[in-house]
Image (cartoon, coloured by chain):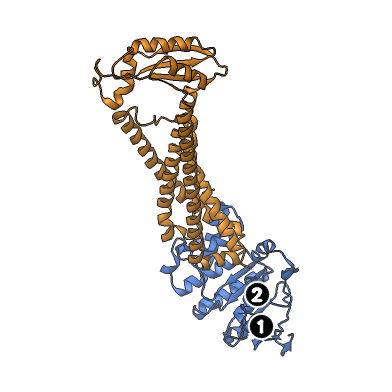
Amino acid sequence: MFRTHYDLPLQRDVTGKFLPWIIALMVYLAMLAMAGSMVLSDMARRWDRGLAGTLTVQVAPLPNQTPPLGDRVNTALAVLRATPGIARAEALPRQDLQTLLEPWLGTGALNADLPIPAMIDVTLAGGRIDMRGLAQRLQAAVPGAELDDHAAWLKDLLAIARAVEAVALGVVALVGGAAVATVIFVSRAGLAIHGPVVELLHVMGAPDRYVARQFQSHVLGLAIRGGIIGTVLAAATLLGLRHAGGEYAAGLLPDMALGQFQLVALALVPVCAAGLAAVTARVTVSRALARLP
Amino acid sequence: MRYGNGPEVLRDVSFTLEPGTFHFLTGASGAGKSSLLRLMYLAHRPSRGLVTMFGHDVASLKRGELPPLRRRIGVVFQNFRLLDHLSALDNVALPLRVAGARESQVKEHVAELLSWVGLGDHLNDKPATLSGGQQQRIAIARAVITRPSLLLADEPTGNVDDRIGMRLLHLFEELNKLGTTIVIATHNEMMIERFGYARMVLDKGMLQHLPRGGGATRIA
């Protein structure tokens, strides 16, 4: 595929000088968009999987603490455990609640006097359960109790995640389209610049594929160079974000770790970009050459 | 034949070149010699009429069937049309590479031919560093490297002195003896007289054929 020399002096073209950088930028943007989409998708899937078949009951502290929070939690546990279809209901220890709140409030910010709601983690047995009836029974038996089946906010969250995924795919498509347009421009410019040489080769009996292959190899080389640059920049950015997430914003930013399959998919971005650029160059040049006699 | 929507530059031209013959093509500037050569090396299709090359009607051939025919034609252009970024060796090797020859054979054959035309010491020199005469010899070597069935040369001796010009004509004669049909467009009357081959004269779109040693025979 790679020729050791070109009959056409394509390497001297000014238009070809900026192509690697454009491809690099596009690969960079596409990889970031895809990585962002993957992270969000993973996050949504984890939420969905983690919360499926669970409920949370929140028992809020009352202004005068009557009845006491502990009593109301016990009553709520009794109501829940007496409900068919509930496999398990456990109140979260205050220590766990403090751990959950630490990213927002800071370590040691919670003391025993600070009123925080009690949380009850409920696991469903698997069958259908009358959520509205359970919520009414809980509210009747336990003042300040709220049943959260996560469905409402999970639905919104998943919708946002899917929208962001769609936007990311749109960005990848736009970036691909821009790359194709750029390669078409570079190829046509090359044909215009080297028109006399192309005509000479044509007169010598060179088939269209002989000339098109030189453009294809040239553009492929430039695109590979650009792909490597874009990949290195994207990898550095993703590693930097992951480092920043772990260092300064644990719990606030999603986990930036990607699986093997996802890393392979990301690695395919520069490969696809190079392939797309090469095919575009070949098709563009072949179509232009078809106009010669 | 016409270019685009312009006037006809060639009309009512009719002739046959027998294989292995040698012809001079003459005519005043603007008579259409280069246009006729363009038709013959298949860089242009006729707007009307019939062009038959190597037994094929060019008009009825598919576009993809033309390259093999073009590879049987060697062309020496008036302005040489050498590729400045390539060495003398790579310029001459172009037709062989286009034809898909193996690289090991290419260098051997090209070096041999360049030595024969007196450029054995300039294999790796770029055309811009060579004289006009040397460039012309490279252009001729490029045209004959594949031993074409038909050789078309547009003023091939225009930039060389008489001694080199004669040597190049003898090279064409050698090629002609091997079976190549030769057509040389030239204004050089002395050369035409000296070699005495058949002459085709273009005048206002009409073609006259003067056979070797004979009178004018109009074949248009």
Q: Secondary structure at mark 2?
A: helix
Residue A92 appearing in the image: yes
Q: Amino acid at mark 1?
A: Leu
Q: Position of residue A264 (x, y in %)?
A: 49, 34
Pinpoint residue A30: horizontal percent, then vertical percent.
Answer: 45, 44
Question: Which image quarter is the C terminus of chain A in?
Answer: bottom right
| Residues at marks 2 and 1, CA–CA distance in whole angstroms | 10 Å
In this image, B124 relative to A85: left or right? left
Q: Position of residue A118 (x, y in %)?
A: 36, 17
Provide the residue designation for mark 2.
B39
**Dot 2 and dot 1 residues touching (CB under 8 Å):** yes
Residue under the point 74% across and 68% down = B60
- Hey, what amino acid is under mark 2? Leu
The answer to whether residue B16 is above or below residue A218 is below
Residue drawn at the location 64% of the way across and 76% of the way down: B183
Residue at mark 2: chain:
B
